[in-house]
Image: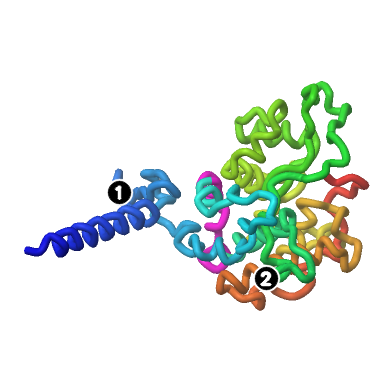
Amino acid sequence: MDARWVLLGVLFLALALAGDADDASVKSNVVKVVKGKKLCDKGWECKGPSEFCCNQTISDYFQTYQFENLFSKRNSPVAHATGFWDYHSFITAAAEYQPKGFGTTGGKLTGMKEVAAFLGHVGSKTSCGYGVATGGPLAWGLCYNKEMSPSSDYCDEYFKYTYPCTPGVSYFGRGAIPIYWNYNYGKTGEALKVNLLDHPEYIEQNSTLAFQAAIWKWMTPADKHQPSAHDVFVGTWKPKANDTLAKRVPGFGTTMNVLYGDDVCGKGEDEHMNNMVSHYLYYLDLMGVGREEAGPHEVMSCAEQEAFKPTSSSS
């Protein structure tokens, strides 16, 4: 047999095996039954064996090409975090929170909408897009991983006993949903078991950690008397009479209320609020969900909402 045909056959076999290995790393679903319960392991995204891993996970409906479509300009030469953000880091970070409901609550449609909503915040907060930017202003999410020209070191001495500022360290904005101030780095670090109070720079050095911090913020109530952004989006939070009076309803608009309060909510058609809404709708379209699934204006917006915790300096 011609040596060239042998070599070609070996090459095709190697490519086939490599493809199988790649598929297995994402889609493997090893099943076992223990005490009558089906337990699964899906590899890097959902390490089992557990009952949860038998369910649909984010990579089943949100794949690499969709992440690339949403953030198509993030690695452009003019971007400020070229090569930093990637799909694998997002899924790795999300894996810890999927069993808690992130992207996995209420079926595929709700999961896709929640991922689009979360990434809508991320894209808006990390964008360097502008009106005439190539690809349009909404294509430039994940352009940054840190604040470029900090106006302050963001050290609040009020917290000097609980989250004391480390000498020489600056707590300016870093991450997918940027973290500001020493006390926020301290709280986030405690939750993630990483010393961010002494080393806030870890957030700008590790994209998985940056996504983890943002998803933790999305999933965690800022106050014991408030819901999380996750809860208000997927509908596990049920408005009480005071919420109805304050025009707070489940949906994307109230996620902005949870995360930013009266920095963006209750101010009418605020520019920053509208930018987050625009990113959310754009991502719904690109993910194949469609912006019509976002709901009416009062669900998407927080223009008329009162803040859960009114303050002049929401962090």
The one nearer the camera, 78 or 3, is 3
Amino acid type at circle 1 is: Gly
Q: Residue at x 57, y 53 (%)?
A: 102
Residue 241 pos. (x, y %) = 82, 60
The residue carrying pointer 2 sits among few (fewer than 14), some (14 to 19) or many (20 or more) residues within 10 Å by Cα, namely few
Q: Disc 1 vs disc 2: Cβ atoms closer than 8 Å? A: no
Residue 236 visible in this rendered orientation of the protein: no
SS class, disc 1: loop
Residue 36, numbered label: 1
Expressed as whole percent of the image width and height from the top left, the position of residue 282 reads 67, 70
Taking the magenta stretch, the answer to whether it contains residue 102 is yes
Give the labeled residue for mark 2. 135
Identify the image's colour scheme: rainbow, by chain, secondary structure or one colour: rainbow
Query: For the residue carrying disc 1, how many other residues have a C-alpha within 10 Å: few (<14), some (14-19), or many (20+)?
Result: few
What distance separates the C-alpha of mark 1 from that of mark 2?
A: 53 Å
The image shows residue 215, relative to residue 138, as above or below, that is above
- Which region of the structure is painted magenta? 93-111
User: Taking 103 as reference, is 27 left or right?
Assistant: left
Residue 266 image point, x, y percent: 89, 61
